[in-house]
Amino acid sequence: MSSENSKRIAKNTFVLYVQMVVAMLIGLYTSRVVLNVLGVEDFGIYSAIGGVVAMFGILNSAMSSSTSRFITFELGYGKFERLKAVFSTSLLIHIGLALLVCLITLPIGLWFLKTYMVIPSLRMNAAVWVLYSVVIATFFGILSVPYNASIVAHEKMSIFAYFSVIDLTLKLAIVLILPVLPYDKLKAYAVLLVVVQVIMQFIYWLYCYRNFKEVRVGLKWEKGLFKEMTSFAGWSLFGDSAYLMYTQGLNVLLNVFFGAPVNAARGIAVQVQGVLMRFTSGFQTALNPQITKSYAGGDLKYMHRLIFSSSKFSFFLVLMLSIPVFLEAEQLLLWWLKVVPDHTVNFVRILLLISLIDCLANPLIFAAKATGRIKKYQAILGTLLLMVVPVSYLFLKMGYQPESVFIVHLVISILGQAVRVWLISPMINLSLREYFFKIALRCFFVVVVASLAPLILHMIISDSNVSRLLLVSVASLVSVSALTYYMALDKQEKTFFNQMVLSRFKSST
């Protein structure tokens, strides 16, 4: 990595990690309070309905991916007129998309809610309120996509982090006032989240309008660019629909077969997974624009180094945190929630394993999208990942427990990663042999060896207490850190890591 790029990545990573720590603390607290205030049933209702609406938001997910790729690519390519056209066209597309998603989601969502979802009759009115609220929040969320993409593409990670903290603070305020509100708690929670979404949309718009020239131009439609972006989005849609199907689709399946309490367990497990993945999002968010820009500039060697570094640092950081959470999940959830829904512990443990696969997948996904040639990749990967839901359905029909859907998810995720590497390597001239020895083999070695000491401590200390948690956590920290630094990182990655640590240490003194 060049010195200038390394410093920028180190600075952006540090800022995003500070934001992540704040987000984690607020998220853990708010999740506990919301669960206690709403109760398991209402919490499950909100989670299930949110899943239904998210399934109808796959169009936005695809266009978001397209917008982010095109804006970042044009910044790396260096043509301002083209950048203006990209932003203007993407904004027009998202305005139309926001209206389309709402028109589709409301009638179909109401029909599905009243026909198939398992909602107690006394809570149906509140569930309808939640549906309307989530749809409105989705509308404004879609409009914010081009602005968010511009902030990340310009690598203004400090601004991105500040706005995320504002968003979390507003949501924390909702949690603090929710217990004293003299209204139905589920309705109030849903409506107040819409208010937060509207406020955040205005903040993003104001900052981008003041700081990015391409945002201040008038709306202009370019037919050729529209076709190019929607073609990219069309194939992204296939892959993104697979992702949403095996996340939100599984959520709906769990509701149909087991009811809202299991949705609550799944919702808690996903929040735990989300907290851990935030530890990697900072580093990956800082690196992803560089991956796209390096491809746009024709520097494939640098692109490969970014993919390797992002994969390693993300994987080992999540591994370090996952080992103690995996081993001590039952006690941690009890301390956190006091009342732990059935199946939550097993859900958490399986999702932690899936998270490790996701750490390796994300850099390759961005590399594929940087090329713009995603038709074959999305067709094959999307088809494979879409198999999660029908296979899970078959297991549930045969009478298997809820955990079976997550095991299916894990197995297909592992297979999907192998297929992903095979497909993307020729697209970016990446050596399969180099990826196997530098990433796959080293990650496997560290997982096996680093897990031994924490596992032994967990087994020989029979009492579940703070002392055992601390010992297991320290063992995980030391073993993963040492093995990663001395066995997994190459010379350049060690130098980058040292520079990042030293630069943060100097800035704090």
Image: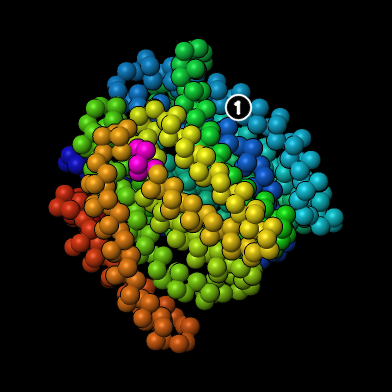
Q: Residue at x 45, y 73 (%)?
A: 327
Who is closer to the viewer here, 110 or 200? 110
Who is closer to the viewer here, 454 or 256? 256
Residue extending farthest right: 121
Give how far across and how far down residue 169 sits, in percent.
53, 52
226 vs 381: above or below: above
Q: Which residue is mark 1?
A: 97
Give how far across and how far down residue 434 sits, in percent.
22, 46
275 vs 466: above or below: above
Residue 53 magenta-drawn? no
Q: Residue at x 52, y 27 (%)?
A: 234
254 vs 89: above or below: below
Tag 1 secondary structure = helix
Q: Residue at x 20, y 51 (%)?
A: 493
357 lies left or right of 235: left
92 vs 418: above or below: above
Range of residues picked out in magenta: 420-424
Can residue 225 be seen by looking at this rendering?
yes
- The quadrant of the image that shows the C terminus is bottom left
Q: Residue at x 78, y 55 (%)?
A: 119
Give how far across and how far down residue 178 sits, in percent.
68, 57
Residue 423 position by quadrant: top left
Q: How is the image coloured?
A: rainbow
Can residue 204 be seen by looking at this rendering?
no
- The quadrant of the image that shows the N terminus is top left
Amino acid on which the number 1 mark rests in the picture: Leu
Helix, strand or loop: magenta stretch? helix
Who is closer to the viewer here, 396 or 146? 396
279 lies left or right of 406: left
Assess disc 1: are there few (<14), some (14-19) or many (≥20) residues with their C-alpha within 10 Å of its C-alpha.
Answer: some
66 lies left or right of 190: left
Give how far across and how far down residue 502 sits, in percent.
19, 55
